[in-house]
């Protein structure tokens, strides 16, 4: 059925690539909205940020679960697993945990923490750095080592 709705998805080895982009967008968006809400003292922006952070945290959990499910079946060489996939997993687990902690904190102090606000904002910056580094490794696996499809012969050894 998915092939009729999303024919390109039939070329995917797993559904992880379909789930990863939403939390990335929501987490970056939430961070931007929180910083703008803090600078302008806009409660509307802070509420928007809270909703985006909640959606980002839920999406990150789904992406993390799908990634753990997908990893054993990836058609990549052992060298790519050892060097890229392992680090990608560690960064994305850390990203998901930290996003979850910040989301619970923000939800408990709706819409944005007032005590230790700077710690919260630094936490958002840290999440964005972790997310960027982890997504970069994921992108490298997909585009340099064909981890998401079957466009070239598998496995491709690590070039580094």
Image (spheres, rainbow, N blue to C red):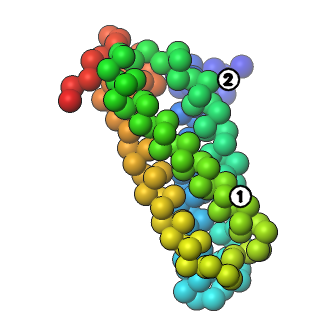
Labelled pair 1, 2 in contact (Cβ < 8 Å)? no
As rendered, which of 7 and 130 lies closer to the eye? 130
- Where in the figure is residue 19, as x and y percent of width and height? 60, 38
As rendered, which of 62 and 44 lies closer to the eye? 62
Mark linked to residue 12? none
Mark linked to residue 54? 1
Query: Under tag 1, what secondary structure?
Result: helix
User: Which residue does the image show at 62% across and 79% down from the upper left?
Assistant: 116
Query: Under tag 2, what secondary structure?
Result: helix
- Where in the figure is residue 66, as x and y percent of width and height? 62, 30
Q: Is residue 48 rendered to the left or right of residue 149?
A: right
Q: Is residue 143 above or below residue 120?
A: above
User: Which residue does the image show at 53% across and 17% down from the upper left?
Assistant: 72
As rendered, which of 94 and 19 lies closer to the eye? 94
- Where in the figure is residue 36, as x and y percent of width and height? 55, 80
Q: Is residue 79 above or below residue 44?
A: above
User: Which residue does the image show at 71% across and 19% down from the upper left?
Assistant: 1
- State which quadrant residue 134 falls in: top left
Q: Is residue 104 above or below residue 13?
A: below
> Residue 103, can we see it?
yes
Image quarter hosting the C terminus = top left
Gap between marks 1 and 2 measured at Cα: 27 Å
Q: Which residue is mark 2?
A: 2
As rendered, which of 9 and 155 lies closer to the eye? 155
């Amino acid at each position: 059925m998915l092939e009729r709705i999303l024919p390109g998805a039939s070329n995917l080895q797993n559904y992880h690539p379909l789930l990863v982009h939403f939390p990335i967008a929501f987490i970056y968006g939430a961070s931007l909205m929180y910083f703008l809400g803090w600078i302008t003292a806009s409660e509307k922006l802070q509420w928007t940020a809270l909703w985006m952070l909640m959606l980002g945290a839920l999406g990150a959990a789904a992406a993390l679960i799908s990634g753990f499910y997908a990893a054993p079946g990836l058609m990549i060489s052992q060298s790519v697993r050892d060097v890229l996939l392992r680090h990608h997993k560690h960064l994305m687990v850390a990203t998901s945990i930290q996003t979850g902690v910040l989301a619970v904190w923000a939800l408990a102090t709706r819409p944005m923490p007032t005590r230790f606000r700077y710690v919260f904002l630094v936490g958002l910056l840290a999440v964005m750095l972790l997310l960027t580094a982890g997504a970069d490794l994921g992108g490298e696996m997909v585009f340099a080592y064909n981890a998401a499809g079957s466009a070239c012969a598998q496995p491709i050894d690590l070039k580094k």
